[in-house]
Amino acid sequence: MGAVTCAGILSPAIATAAPAAVPGLDDPAKKEIAMKLVSSAENSSLDWKAQYKYIEDIRDGRGYTAGIIGFCSGTGDMLDLVQLYTDRKPGNVLARYLPALRRVNGTDSHSGLDPNFPADWRKAAQDSAFQQAQNDERDRVYFNPAVRQGKADGLRALGQFAYYDAIVMHGDGGDATSFSSIRRRALRTAKPPAQGGNETTYLNAFLDARVWAMKQEEAHSDTSRVDTAQRVFLRQGNLDLNPPLDWKVYGDSYHIG
């Protein structure tokens, strides 16, 4: 009797299911967009899955840059990736380079890697286990921390992506151009939504700080991935990063329908 009575007195507002939360960047469809956006800037292509095999020295002082997120032999993330791959699949074609990767970490040196490391990287990239290792390290080191901080700051998908793209390029070390330092610089002039601020105002401040950080390094001084991509979406008010999306990077045009 009591159960029937309780059901009967529910108001329409209570009985109606709450609207679904707006998808964050970790929603599968949004994450796919994020991967394409980063690939347009890092590899001039929307086909991010074709980048598992990518490897070259882009002469930015970080040694070899490779894979779907630009793992670098000089910054430690490539070493961590190859170590993970080897833990999962001992004796793989890259395992023998682990001592050299430890030695060159923190430098732009190819010592112990040349001449065969690029070819062996491309060979390993055909292995689904190596592809999964790249995915997992991308998420552990870059994607998940960016989305977690973005959500904590009350940002929607665009803001979470702005964080992700920044941490991909700058890492999150202790230097003045790291992701955390960029965020602190933004917080000096604007508050994120979680602190009562306006989301658009805060994201403009964050992108301003990001551009400053990019201009501190010649290799990153072209700021089009912010100016003609992220700011375009922000000016449009597309805080949920909903397609269709049209943007440019380094003068090339891209579209997601």
Image (spheres, grey):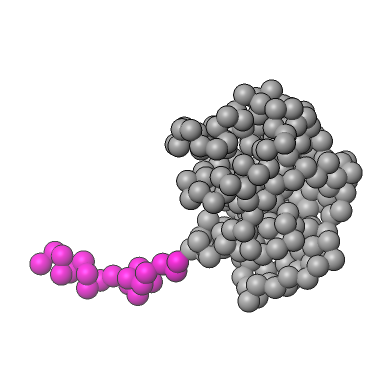
Question: Which x, y percent locates residue 156?
Answer: 61, 59
The residue segment tinted magenta is 1-20
Whether residue 238 is situated above or below residue 24 in the rendered picture: below
Q: Residue furthest left?
A: 1
Question: Which x, y percent locates residue 187?
Answer: 74, 44
Q: How many marks?
A: 0
Near-viewer residue (180 or 142): 142
- The image quadrant of residue 65 is top right
Q: Residue furthest front?
A: 115
In the visual, does 186 lie left or right of 243?
A: right
In the visual, does 144 lie left or right of 3?
A: right
Near-viewer residue (191 or 231): 231
Q: Residue at x 57, y 62 (%)?
A: 32
Q: Residue at x 83, y 47 (%)?
A: 220
Whether residue 68 is situated above or below residue 137 in the rendered picture: below
Residue 208 within the magenta-colored segment of the rendering: no
Near-viewer residue (106 or 158): 106
Q: Residue at x 83, y 61 (%)?
A: 250
Q: Is residue 137 visible?
A: yes
Q: Is residue 171 visible?
A: no
- The image quadrant of residue 110 is top right
Question: Which x, y percent locates residue 216?
Answer: 88, 41
